[in-house]
Image (spheres, rainbow, N blue to C red):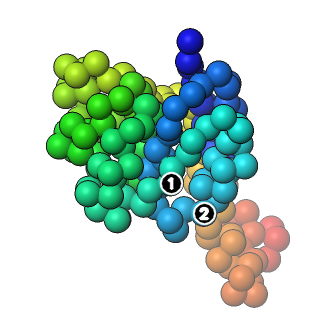
Amino acid sequence: MSYCVLIATGLTITVGVRMTGKVVFLIRSSDTARRDAVLSAKPAGWKLSLVDPDEGEEQIAKELEDAQFLLALGGRVSSEVLKTAKQLKLIQAWGMGTDHLPVRWCIENGIFVANAGGANAIAVAEHTVLLMLACLKRFTAFNHSIREGSFLGTNGNAGSH
């Protein structure tokens, strides 16, 4: 029995390992932080192939020919490319959306598609509260005035009234 559990939250990666087969990781070569995070968490048994989506569909299709799993972070993957992936079992989208994947085609052809929906829900909520407080407390105006050498007091005038 083979299975893979990959939970990505920011750059924290937890991997449950009892998996055999080839994993293709579709990621732009410029995204070094995530690339390094995945490489550092890669279990010994994984056959991991890193593919930049900018290399084109032909290269992606070639790498997927013998792959069982696709971890899609960047770029679109067409059903034409996936037709070459005769052993593909699962496509894991890195984020919330799956609009860059042919989900209906995958379902019709027995390929599971998963996303990481909700993985960043707490961080998004915290960021939202932070932005609301920044607006309420006029953070950008005060930050700007301090950088210019003047301090806007609480009533908006220079000084600390």
Q: Is residue 63 left or right of residue 147?
A: left
- Name the residue rendered at 25%, 40% in the picture: 84
Q: Disc number at residue 32?
A: 2
Position of residue 117 measured from the top left corner of the image (x, y, whole percent): 48, 29
Q: Helix or strand or loop: what does disc 1 sit on?
A: strand
Q: Locate residue 156 relative to residue 31 in the image: left or right.
A: right
| Amino acid beneath label 2 | Thr
Q: Residue at the spot x=41%, y=27% of the render?
A: 90
Residue 121 visible here: no
**44 over 30 or under it: above or below:** above
Q: Earlier in the sequence, mark 2 or mark 1?
A: 2
Kind of residue sitting beneath label 1 = Leu
Q: Secondary structure at mark 2?
A: helix
Compared to 96, does 151 lie above or below?
below
- Indicate which label's residue lies in the foreground, 2 or 1: 1
Q: Could you say which quadrant of the image residue 46 lies in?
A: top right
Which quadrant is the N terminus positioned in?
A: top right
Closer to the camera in the image, 48 or 136? 48
Q: Nearer the viewer, residue 126 or 160?
A: 126
Find residue 61 and report its horizontal and vertical position in percent: 29, 49
| Mark 1 nearby-residue class (10 Å; few <14, some 14–19, many ≥20) | some
Disc 2 crowd rating (10 Å Cα; few below 14, some 14-19, many 20+) is few
At which x and y percent is residue 103?
Answer: 26, 29
Farthest residue in the bottom direction?
Answer: 149
Q: Is residue 1 visible?
A: yes
In the rendered view, tell whether residue 113 sits above or below residue 28: above
Left of 75 or right of it: where is 3?
right
Q: Position of residue 70 (x, y in %)?
A: 43, 38
Specify the quadrant that holds the C terminus.
bottom right
Which residue matches tag 1? Answer: 50
Measure the C-alpha gap from mark 2 to mark 1. 12 Å
Q: Residue at x 21, y 37 (%)?
A: 83
